[in-house]
Amino acid sequence: MDSGYYAAVSGWVARGQAVDTAAANLANAQTPGYRAEREYFRSVLTAEDADESQAGQAVNRFGLLGGTRLSSAQGPRQRTGNPLDLAIEGNGFFAIQTASGLRLTRDGNFHRTQSGVLVTAAGDPVLSQAKQQIVVPSGEVSAGADGSLSAGGAVFGSLGVFEPANGGQLQAEGANRYAAAQGAVSQSRSFAIHQGELEGSNQDVIRGSLDLLLMQRQAEMMQKALMIFHTEFNRTASEDLPRV
C-alpha cells in the first residue's frame, strides 16, 4: 500500500487532535491564570517489531501527536486594586488544597472567609510555604514580592509558590487548575508577587483564532488527501485486480 496513505492518516489524526487543543486555548483566552497547551509530535510504533515489517516502516516515517505541554509564557498582568488579588511574575504556581488533594494554579483571585481563611474564588484554601492554610487577620493586608504576608506591620504568613518536582509535567484539571505527578512539588526560587493584580491567560485571542483556523484547514487538507487515496484504491480494486 502506498506509504502516502499512512502519511495522510497520520496527518489527519494529528491535525484533528490539534484542532481540539486550539479550540480549548481560544475558549480560555480570557481565563485568569490559564496556561495554553502546545502540541508536540512523536513517531508511532505499531508493535515492538514494527521496523521489521513494510507497514511498520511506512507508518514510522510520519509523526503523530504525542500530546500537549503547558506553555510557560508569562500572561499579561491586569491591575484590579483588590489587595487580595495576587499575580506571580516568573516561575511557579500558588498551591491550593482541594477535595482531590494539593493542586496548583496561577489564578490569584483570592478572598478571606468569615473565619479568616484565605481561599480561591472556588473556595479552596490557599496554602503557605509549609503547605498549611493561611489565616488572614483583620486589617489591611500587604504582600511582599517574596510572598510574605503582613497586617498592621506584622508578618503573619508566607504564600507558597511551587513548581512540579524534578521538572515534571502538570496535568490540567479544568481551566486553570493543575495537578503535579503524585502531588510532588518543590518551592520555586524565581518569582515575584504583585499585589492588587491578576495574571491573565497566556493565550491571546488573535493568535488563538489564527491557530484554530490553521489547524482546521490542515485537517481539511488531510481529509481531502484521504479521499483521493480511497478513490485510487477503489479504482485498483475494480479495474486492476480483476485482471490478475
Image: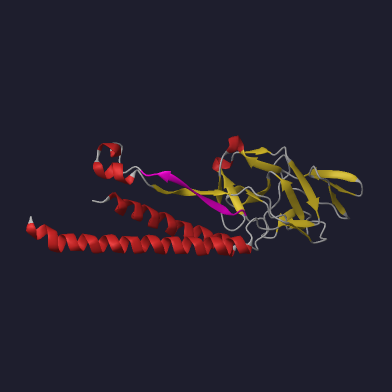
Residue 227 is one of the magenta-drawn residues: no
Residue 42 is one of the magenta-drawn residues: yes
| Colour scheme of the picture | secondary structure
- Residue 209 % position (x, y): 57, 64
- Residue 146 % position (x, y): 80, 42
Rendered image quadrant of residue 15 = bottom left
Closest to the observer: 87 or 96?
87
Q: Tell me: 51 left or right of 116.
A: left
- Residue 7 % position (x, y): 35, 51
| Residue 155 at least partly seen | yes
In the image, what residue occupies the spot 24% across and 42% down? 54
Q: Quadrant of the C terminus?
A: bottom left
| Residue 133 at least partly seen | no
Closest to the observer: 71 or 125?
71
- Residue 104 % position (x, y): 64, 48
Q: Tell me: 102 left or right of 139.
A: left
In the image, what residue occupies the spot 69% across and 58% down? 200
Please tell me whether residue 227 is drawn above or below residue 185 in the rendered image.
below
Rendered image quadrant of residue 221 = bottom left
In the image, what residue occupies the spot 78% across and 48% down? 193
Tell me which segment is drawn in magenta: 35-44
Q: Tell me: 232 left or right of 12.
A: left
- The extreme right residue here reads 153
Closest to the observer: 101 or 15?
15
Q: Main secondary structure of the magenta part?
A: strand
Q: How many marks?
A: 0
